[in-house]
Image: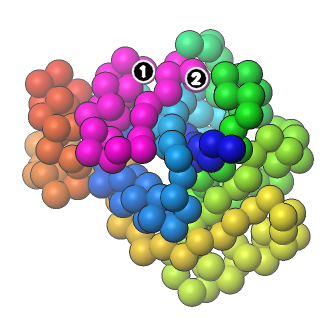
Amino acid sequence: MKRIGLFGGTFNPVHNGHLNLLRQVQAQMQFDELLLIPSHLPPHKEASNLASGKDRLEMLTLAVEDIPEAGVCDIELHKSGKSYTIETLKKLRRLFPTAEFYFIVGTDMLLTFDQWKQWRDILKLTYLVASGRDEGEYERLCEKAQKLDRERIIVLKTRPLPLSSTEIRKKLKAGEDVSGLLPPKVLHYIRQKGLYR
């Protein structure tokens, strides 16, 4: 059975923190395929200065060129309104009827997971893979996983690269150097297109 890792987000823009997490999760989980899914309108946050779906898709494609298992999926960009995980998973299930899904989430996402739309149904369609940044956080995630569904939630230890897209957009707007924060091809694309000015 094909095992597919799913990594969703606004990716506005995709940065080295995202890629660092992806590589560490992949090293531990060894998925057959990784799908990165940029969201149309994230339900949990108001995205200010949101680059177009086409631009975010293009930046993601450039960012994962050297990760052999990784591809980009535009399934959420075709819908109007907010992107809900449950709806995306149902669509993916139709596209990959026999695959096993693993949805990669950050700490905050797992800790608030039981507030998500139809969270119990989400766990019927996918495993959750959460990454703990430090010892204390790892323990908290394990406790939360235990409460929600021990069978369907996997908690990994990872060493994160703490970066935020919001901070990067601020730096870009201010004309500061962000060369160490973004993949070179993504930075080139942003400059070429004049994004986040």
Side of 4 relative to 144 (left or right): left
Residue 71 falls inside the magenta stretch: yes
Q: Is residue 123 visible?
A: yes
Residue at figure coordinates x 70%, y 60% from the top left: 110
Q: Nearer the viewer, residue 38 or 47?
A: 38
The residue sitting at the bottom extreme is 135
Res. 47 in view: no
Dividing the image into 4 quarters, which one contains the N terminus?
Answer: top right
**Label 2 SS:** loop
- Callout 1 amino acid: Gly
Q: Position of residue 30 (x, y in %)?
A: 51, 58
- Location of residue 96 with respect to 6 vertically, above or below: above
> Which disc, if any, is residue 53?
1
Q: Which residue is mark 2?
A: 76
Residue drawn at (41%, 69%) of the image: 160
Q: Position of residue 98 (x, y in %)?
A: 74, 34
Disc nearer the start of the sequence (1/2): 1
On residue 192, the disc is none
Task: Determine the residue positioned at 70% across, 55% down.
Answer: 128
The boundaries of the magenta stretch are: 51-77
Question: Residue at the spot x=62%, y=12% of the render?
Answer: 80
From this viewpoint, which residue is outermost toward the front? 1
